[in-house]
Amino acid sequence: MGHNEHELPLAKKMAKELNMIFFPKLNWEPGYSSVKNADFVKMEAGMSVVSKDEYQKKYKKVYLLPCVQFWVSPQINWDGKLLGCCQNLWGDFGNVFAQGFETCLTGERFVYAKKMLCGEAKTRGDIPCTKCSLYKEILQNPLKKKDIVFSRF
Ligand code: SF4
């Protein structure tokens, strides 16, 4: 984002010191604090695009990274609710504080949601994705194995 793009070098340095993967994502809301210095951000973030629009133009597909979080970095709310992805405002898949992370990750609804995202299971109303605008894209272009990786672009 434009307001903190100058902190990319510091964030990379901190990640290295903490032995963590540095994995930047594109700004979700293009109308808010868009990138100011695209060349700098591309170089520092190791990315070939700096916005969802640019991604769609370049790769001829919608930016679906949030969905991939179900596999590579399942999102957990501050109160322990397993959300799966950062876009999910509509429901959870159990509470990792109360039930444990493994139990939630292997829960029937979480596993079913992943199958839905890959087009291997029918749409089911109790899965939060059905309320998400990106799910329409998923129905047209379900995730493929090659999409489900930590990858830069
Ligand atoms: S469809 Fe929406 S709610 Fe479901 S994983 Fe993708 S971004 Fe998240």
Image (cartoon, grey):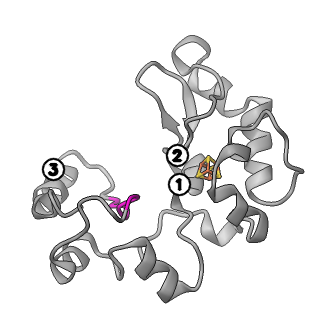
What quarter of the picture does the N terminus occupy? bottom left
Residue at horizontal 85 percent and vertical 41 percent from the top: 124
Instruction: Indicate which disc, 1 or 2, sits on the residue closer to the N terminus.
Output: 1
Residue at horizontal 55 percent and vertical 21 percent from the top: 96
Instruction: Indicate which disc, 1 or 3, sits on the residue closer to the N terminus.
Output: 3
- The amino acid sitting under disc 2 is Gln
The residue that label 2 is drawn on is 87
The residue that label 3 is drawn on is 14
In the image, is residue 95 above or below residue 37?
above
Q: Which mark, by number, is residue 66? A: 1
Element under disc 1: helix
Q: Residues within 10 Å of mark 2 (few under 14, many from 20)?
A: some
Nearest the viewer among 152 and 17 is 152
Do the residues bearing badges 1 and 2 touch, measured as CB atoms within 8 Å? yes
In the image, is residue 15 above or below residue 142?
above
Task: Please indicate whether residue 114 sits to the left or right of residue 37 in the image.
Answer: right
Query: Does any atom of ligand 1 lie closer than 8 Å to the CB of label 1?
Result: yes
The range drawn in magenta is: 23-29
Provide the major secondary structure of the magenta segment.
loop
What quarter of the picture does the C terminus occupy? bottom left
Query: Does any atom of ligand 1 lie closer than 8 Å to the CB of label 2?
Result: yes
Q: Position of residue 95 (x, y in %)?
A: 58, 19
